[in-house]
Image (spheres, rainbow, N blue to C red):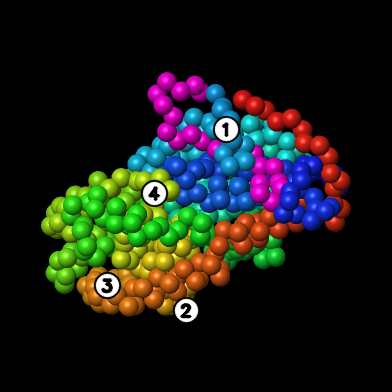
Amino acid sequence: MTVVAVVQTISDKSPPGTWFVRILYIHQYFRTRQMTGGTRSLEMARRLVEMGHEVDLVTSDNEPPPDASRAWRVTVEEGIRVHWYPLPYSNAMSYSQRIRAFFRFAWKSARRAASIPADVVFASSTPLTVAIPGAYAARKQRVPMVFEVRDLWPDMPIAMGALKNRLAVAAARALERFAYRKSRHIVALSPEMKQGVVRAGKPEDRVTVIPNGCDLDLFPASDAEARAFRNSLPWLGDRPLVLYAGAIALLNGLGYFVELAKETLRLNADVRFLLVGHGNDRLRLRDLAAQIGVLDKNLFFIDSVPKAEMPAILAAASIATSTVVDVPGVSANSANKFFDALAASRPIAINHTGWLADVIEQNDCGLVLPAHDVPAAAQRLVDAIHDEAWLRAAGQRGRSVAERQFSRETLASRLESVLRSAVDADGVRPPRAPAVERPST
């Protein structure tokens, strides 16, 4: 039985005698609200800090300046001690380039993570390779690892045809089994992801669903902010706006969005479609939009924006969207854009079945569009946009769902319980002990 030390920390929110843990959080794509991309790691980690825990987060700096040092740097972000390693990465990279970046981060972060005293290691995928530094650090420090499954990898690259080589597939499956075997507990971001983990051999009672969440403190933006965004786009004005904001990658199936714009142009030429984001499918989509006659006519592109700027864009939208390609397993997603729409009191339209479709249909907070009948989808979309009373009510119902089921506070408390249980799994609550000095560079 391993006795671990916990940080002696005082929190005004915690009752006397509460014990606190040192959490080593590994996530290759950590983002603040001033950066583009999802902020789940920030939102969870800062709330763990507020609960009194000590959090070190090991991540990569994906956009280092050309003259940047190759050494680690450390910052403090909302109480989180963040360890950054300079490693260029973007969705515009080829699959082989991304694979190399995954393994380089795993190699560089393993020793760093092992040097940071911790009571529990929390490794968050994707990529699946974060299990390597997570398991290494946990073994070196003789502490448990909790592993977070954000997508069912390697199922997704296999289904998309990106991973074809039989040896590569076998190696990826072996890494998946390694990640689950070395984890005391698994956090899955959707019920369907949990099912996938259980099918891979993890006992059901060792898997907890903690989906993506809603930042109720950030959304919604004011009417004035929405108006300012609309006024910044000469082609928008007071016209209805259909929004997609997120990664523009093959997995997102945004050819559907472009075709939807084409069909909607025939039904109502005033409706505008906006794609906000970047990724390896952006150029192809622009070419497709130009080819079918919607680019800069009723379909427009703008670059990714920091999370802090998203509330104004969503407030300006009539309806938000989240699309995926029609391949097995993708409907298990827990897309940030879905939860941002709920928090922003905006109806959300998706083109797939699964648990998110169930949320929409059970709460009448959006549309589940047919994946293989774009003309019918366009008609449903236009009918909804013409129904201003439904748009308002659906948005309000979405916000209510956000508050009841998906607030970050509720989900962070659930994560805290999982991490505490992992530390306390042997039935002996360790005594408090002073924190050990951590590396500063």
Q: Position of residue 312 (x, y in %)?
A: 36, 54
What's the amino acid at mark 2? Gln
Mark 3 or 1, nearer chain start: 1
Q: CA distance from mark 3 to mark 1?
A: 45 Å
- How packed mark 2 is, by other alpha carbons closer than 10 Å (few <14, some 14-19, many 20 or more), is few
Per the image, the residue denoted by label 1 is 75
Eyeballing the image, is 198 above or below 286? below
CB-based contact (under 8 Å), mark 2 and mark 1: no
Q: Amino acid at mark 4?
A: Glu
Residue at the spot of label 3: 385
What separation in Å lies between label 2 and label 4 (alpha carbons)? 30 Å
| Secondary structure of residue under mark 2 | helix
Q: Label 2, label 1: how many angstroms apart (C-alpha)?
A: 43 Å
In the picture, residue 197 is in which quadrant?
A: bottom right
Amino acid carrying mark 1 in the image? Thr
Q: Residues within 10 Å of mark 1 (few under 14, many from 20)?
A: some
Q: Are marks 3 and 1 in contact (CB under 8 Å)?
A: no
